[in-house]
Image (cartoon, rainbow, N blue to C red):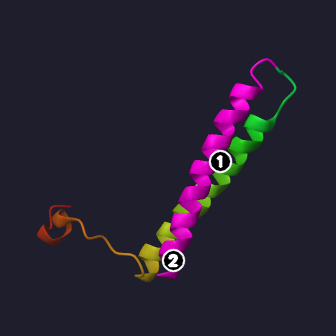
Amino acid sequence: MFLKIIIGVLFLAVVASLTSGLVFLLKDMGATDSKRTLYALGIRITLAALLLLTIFYGFYTGQLASTAPWESRGLL
């Protein structure tokens, strides 16, 4: 259960970083020396990598499992 909470928080942080990047992009439209959008991109990439690593860890340890209907039929 704790792993699912971490995944949810990381996902919300990625969405918040995406939103802040959009706001910075719109506010700094004419400013050529502003790097806020670039920093927001770096934070978003880091958070997305952490999110993927957390999901892979959950599948590796068995704390997360797929409940897709095609898994039980052996289609993949």
The furthest residue to the left? 73
Q: Could you say whether the residue bearing mark 1 is in a helix, strand or loop?
A: helix
Front-lying residue, 20 or 68: 20
Q: Residue at x 71, y 46 (%)?
A: 42
Q: Could you tell me the amino acid type at mark 1?
A: Ser
Residue 24 lies, in percent from the top left, at: 73, 34
The furthest residue to the top? 30
- Which mark, by number, is residue 63? none
Check residue 17 for magenta coloring.
Answer: yes
Q: Would residue 49 be visible to someone looking at this image?
A: yes
Q: Residue at x 79, y 37 (%)?
A: 36
How packed mark 1 is, by other alpha carbons closer than 10 Å (few <14, some 14-19, many 20 or more), is: many
User: Where, quadrant-wise, is the C terminus in this rendering?
Assistant: bottom left
Direction from residue 41 to residue 5 in the image, left or right = left
From what the image shows, is residue 47 above or below residue 37? below
Direction from residue 19 to residue 27 in the image, left or right = right
Quadrant of res 19: top right
Residue 39 lies, in percent from the top left, at: 77, 42
Q: Would residue 53 be visible to someone looking at this image?
A: no
Q: Could you tell me the amino acid type at mark 2?
A: Leu
Quadrant of res 54: bottom right
How packed mark 2 is, by other alpha carbons closer than 10 Å (few <14, some 14-19, many 20 or more), is: some
Judging by the rendered image, the residue that carries numbered circle 1 is 17
Judging by the rendered image, the residue that carries numbered circle 2 is 3
Residue 47 lies, in percent from the top left, at: 63, 57
Residue 73 lies, in percent from the top left, at: 12, 68
- Do the CB atoms of the residues marked 2 and 1 lie less than 8 Å apart? no
Q: What span is colored magenta in the figure?
A: 1-30
Magenta stretch: dominant SS? helix
Check residue 38 for magenta coloring.
Answer: no
